[in-house]
Image (cartoon, rainbow, N blue to C red):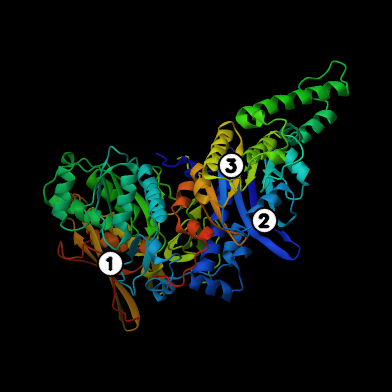
Amino acid sequence: MLSVRNLRAGYGSVEVLHGVSLHVDSGEIVTIVGANGAGKSTLLGTLAGLVPARAGAAHFSGAEITSLPAETVASRGCVLVPEGRQLFADLTVAENLLLGGYLRARRGLLRRGSRREAQDGTRHGTRRGARRDLEQDMRKVCGLFPILARRKTQAAGTLSGGEQQMLALGRALMARPALLMLDEPSIGLAPLVVQEIFEVILRLRQEGTTILLVEQNARAALSISDRGYVMETGRIMLEGNARELSANNDVRRSYLGREYRRIDE
Amino acid sequence: MIWNRKYEAMERSRMDQLQLERLQATLNRVERNVAFYRQSLGAEGIRAEDIRQLSDLARLPFTTKDDLRKSYPYDMFAVPLRDIVRIQSTSGTTGTPVVVGYTPNDLRTWAECVARVLAAGGTTEHDVMQVAFPYGLFSGGFGLHAGAERVGASVIPASTGSLEKQVLIMKDFKTTALACTPSYALAIASAAGEMGMQRGQLALKTGYFGAEPWSEGLRSRLEEALGITALDNYGLTEVLGPGVSFECEKKNGLHVNEDCFIVEVVDPRSGDVLSEGAEGEIVLTTITKEGFPMVRYRTGDLGSVSREPCPCGRALARMSRIRGRLDDMIILGATKVFPSQIEQIVVAETGLSPHFQVLLDRADGIDAMTILVEPADVRNGDGPKAEHGDPAQRVIRKLEAVLGVAARVETVRQGSLQRAGEGKLNRVVDKRGI
C-alpha cells in the first residue's frame, strides 16, 4: 500500500532523513521505533506532505505522493494523527470530529456522484448525502470511543490526555483513511490509557485500516505490530518482524542511547 | 512443499523493495559497527546512504576470505559479544579459521532457511532425520539440525564417526532422511553394502547433500545405491552455514533465499558483475544477519544465476550447481578442469568404484596428470563388471574427448584411496611445487 525509497527531508539547511526506505502492506500494523531526534516525526510529516521531500519517492496505493500537498495526500486516504494531538481546543468534541470529515464533505459538495443523489441533481441533494455519511461516521466513532459520546458538547481542551488522544484518533477516522499514520500516540499518557489506545488500534486494523505507527515506547508498540523498523539519526538501521525486533538489543539500545566501546565488554 | 510461501513465492517488485530496505539497513549497521567496513567503504569514498538501488551494490568493495582471516577472531562482528549466543568457525585447514557469531534472531533465521531446504525435499514432522554432518564448530551439523527441528522431524544428531554405526542407526532408528556430505554418503553406502544391508531393510527416502561440489554422475550413483532422491543444498559458514540455497523437486538449480541474501556473479579476475546466466564467482551479501553481516563476500565458488521462473512455484532466483571451487581448479598447461568433472567421468564407470584421486606432476617442464582409480567392489553394490574392455581405458578416452585432458589412469588396490571421514576430502595431490 505504501512504498518509500531513499526519502530525504529536513528543515532549512539541516537534513534529517538520510535516504529512508520502507513499505507497509495492506492490513499490516508497522511500527517505527527510535529515540528522540531519530527523525520519526519528520518521516511521517514528509509522507503526509507537511514537510517537503528533497529526494526519493513515496508511493501510496500505486500513485506517487512525494510532491503532493498535504490536503491531497489526506484526501487520498493517507491520514496523519500528529504528535501532541493538535486538537482545536476551543471547539467541541463533536465539532472536532466533524472537521475531521471536512475533505469528504467538501468533495460531496463538488462531486456529482454521492450516495444519495437528489432527483434533480441539485447541490442541495449531494450536500445532504455527504452530511448523512458524516453523521453516520460520527456515530461509529462514538461507538468506538464511548467517552467521546459522553463529552460531545465539551470543549476539546477540557478533556484528559487519554481522551484527547482518542479524539485525535476519532477525528482522523472521520476522513475514512486507508492508511492511518500515528505519531507517538502514547506520549504523556498513563500506562493503562496507553493499553486502551493500543487496543483500539488493533480493532481498527481488524476493521480494515492499515496502520503506520511511530513510537518511542517500543515494547508496547511492537507488541501489537506485525513488523517494524528501527530508526537512528535519520536512517533505517534494522527491519524485521515485531518479534525479532523485540528480541534485538539494538532496539533497546536505540532508545536508551547506550554506547559500548569494545566488542567483548 | 513450499515452507514459506510469503517469501519463496514473493512477487519480484516486492522482493526488490524488501531487498533494498534490508540492504540499506545492513549497510547502515556495518558502517557504524564494523571497523573493517567503515574503512573499506571510506577508502572508496562511499557512504551507506549512497546505495539507492540494488544495482548500486556493484559499487561496493568486496570482502575476501583473507579479510576474514585478518579479522580473527571477532573483528568482523557487528554486535557486542554479549548479544552473540552462538559461535561457529571454519575448519582452518587452509589457514587461520574464520570465526562467525549468531544472535538469537540469526539462529531463528538460520533454522528458517534450512527448514525451506528440507520442506523442498518433502521432509515433514513424519520423517526421521539423521544428521551425519560433524557437530561442533563446523556449521553443517547444527545448521541441518536446527532446520530439521523447525520442520518437526525426529532429529538424530548422529554426527560423523563409525560408518557401521551410521548404518545400524539408519536401519534400527528407521531413518527416512539423511543429511551429510556426498562423499560421506558414498562411504555409508559402501559400508551398508559390506554389512550386507538389503535395500528393503532401510527406510530412506531423501538425501540432502552439500558442503562440497558433487556431480550429476555421483547423484545418480547415490540415488541408486541408497534408493533415495538426492538433493543438493548450498551454504558456507562465512555467510550463514547451510541454507543459502537449495534444490526443489525439479532438480533444476538451487533456489536462493533472496529475502536473506543477495546473490551476484562476478568475473573472478576483474570483479565485474556478470549478466544473468553467465558463469563466474558467486558473491553473497547478507541482508538479515545481525551478528556477522557480510557485504559482497567472494565465496570462491563457481556458478551462474538464473531468474527464469521455476515450475515448482517459487519465485526465488536459482543458482546453478557449483561447478567447483576456484581454489580446486586444476590448471594443466592450457586446460582448466575441476575435480567434479573428473568425478562425473569416473563415477559413470560401473566397473570402477566411485573413489578416485588426482596426482599432478611435472617432468622436464611438462605438467602431467595421473588419475588413480579402484576396481568396483561388487559386494558394495558398485555394479557388475559386465562391460567389456578396460574401464581405465574408457576413462582416458573420455577425459580426452570431453575435457580435452590427456591423463594417465592407474588402477590401484581396492580400498587404498582416501574415503570421506572427518573433514574435507583431499582428492588432488599437486606435486608440481607451484
Label 3 vs label 2: CA separation? 18 Å
Q: Residue at left 34%, top 74%?
A: B96
Label 2 vs label 1: CA separation? 53 Å
The image position of residue A1, as x and y in percent, is 63, 41
**Is residue B267 at least partly visible in the picture?**
no
Of the image marks 3 and 2, the number of the one nearer the N terminus:
2
The local crowd at label 3, few if under 14, some if 14 to 19, many if 20 or more residues have their Cα within 10 Å, is some
Residue for badge 3: A25
Horizontal side, residue B223 vs residue A215: left or right: left
* Type of amino acid at the residue the image marks with label 1: Arg
SS label for mark 2: strand
* Type of amino acid at the residue the image marks with label 3: Asp
Residue under disc 2 on the same chain as residue under disc 1: no
Which quadrant of the figure contains the C terminus of chain A?
bottom left
Q: Provide the chain ID for the residue under circle 3.
A: A
In the displayed orientation, state which residue is furthest to the left. B195
Horizontal side, residue B383 vs residue A204: left or right: left
The image position of residue B241, as x and y in percent, is 37, 58
SS label for mark 1: loop
- Tag nearer the camera, 2 or 1: 2
Q: Which mark is residue B427?
A: 1
Residue for badge 2: A7
Q: Residue at left 15%, top 40%?
A: B201
**Is residue A252 at least partly visible in the picture?**
yes
Label 3 vs label 1: CA separation? 51 Å
Q: Which mark is residue A254?
A: none
The image position of residue B369, as x and y in percent, is 30, 72
Above or below — where is A44 with respect to B211? Answer: above
